[in-house]
Amino acid sequence: MVTATCPASCGELLQGYIEGGEKLISLPIDLYTRVTLTEATSPIRESRLCKSYAAVEATLEHLGYRAGDADGLTLTVESQVPRGKGMASSTADIAASAVAAAAYAGRSLSEMELAAICASIEPTDSTIFRRVTLFDHVKGRAARSYGEFPGCNVMVLEGRGCIDTLEFHKLKSRELIAQGEREMKKALLLFEEGMASGDLGKIGQSATISAIEREKVLKKPGLEWIIETALKLGAYGVNAAHSGSVLGILCGSGFDSEKFEALFWNQRFSDDYCCIRSHRVAQGGAFII
């Protein structure tokens, strides 16, 4: 028996047309998926875990095993991550399954190997990296690594809507995304300055730019009000799930979260959200536990 884990993401800090193609930087938080891989004489494969089983098969094939060597294996997935909200639930399932399969085979995967395996199954979030990473989520290639994210709280606003990530990536407008290249260049520069100096204000500002830019592709109810109110109450900025319904408020101890919630639930658009939860930014990466 082997068990692995991978964190969720509160959407993306940045996502858009960056340096010649679409890339993203995920925001890992302290919600996790655990995947346990065991041998079974008569394994039952749940259809909802098809991506996880695909990850196991792709990993074993990558390590030189034959087709069918995964037939005697079964997976159990325990997840704290809401589905279809843009919180990297599928990435957590897939990455943890791949890492568990490699460990079962007595091997380990580099982050680049893991990225390629995950991206071969579906577009992937950069929560698979231990360090904050600018990532081509379609091709599975890391463009740049920035180190550890400064300590930060995240108020997660979970939307009621659910989005099929694969279908969304088929339907989204690449032309609209490409039109945002100038804004994303500005956002990336602010982000890199913030990471280099540990300035959460600049990081929050860059995330807010990206969230506003994404409105052209996928609107978030009340985003303008949320940004304005959060900043007035001391937040660093607001980030968005670029293919989901979640928003995040990046904040520290100076943010008046109680007042924000009281004001938020009195807004008409609040009916489009189901809950607000507080989390911490977490280290990314898929690990054996």
Image (tube, rainbow, N blue to C red):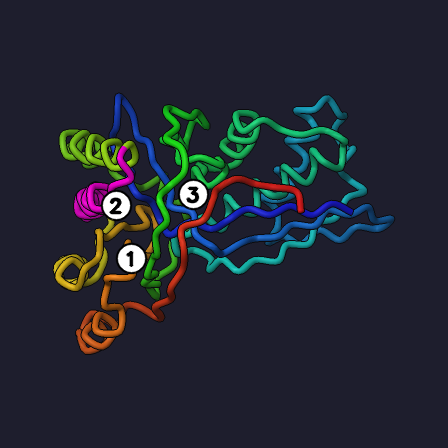
Residue at point 71%, 51% (across, down): 45
What is the spatial separation of the Cα atoms under label 3 and label 1, in whole angstroms?
A: 34 Å
User: Which residue occupies the foreground of this view, 38 or 127?
Assistant: 127
Residue range (magenta): 197-216
**Residue receiving disc 2:** 200
Residue 3 appears left or right of 30: right
- Check contact, mark 3 vs mark 1: CB within 8 A: no
Locate residue 49, reporting x and y percent.
Answer: 61, 50
What is the spatial separation of the Cα atoms under label 3 and label 2, in whole angstroms?
A: 32 Å
Locate residue 141, reporting x and y percent.
Answer: 43, 25
Q: Does the image show residue 132?
A: yes
Mark 3 neighbour class, 10 Å CA radius: few under 14, some 14 to 19, many 20 or more: few
Residue 90 appears left or right of 2: left
Disc 1 element: loop
Q: Does the image show residue 217?
A: no
Q: Amino acid at mark 3?
A: Leu
Residue 124 is drawn in which quadrant? top left
Q: Amino acid at mark 2?
A: Leu
Q: Amino acid at mark 1?
A: Gly
**Residue receiving disc 3:** 166
Could you tell which of marks 3 and 1 lies nearer the N-terminus? 3
**201 in the magenta segment:** yes
Could you tell which of marks 1 and 2 lies nearer the N-terminus? 2
Question: Residue 252 — which label?
Answer: 1
Disc 2 element: helix
Above-or-below relation of 38 to 102: below
Locate residue 59, reporting x and y percent.
Answer: 65, 31
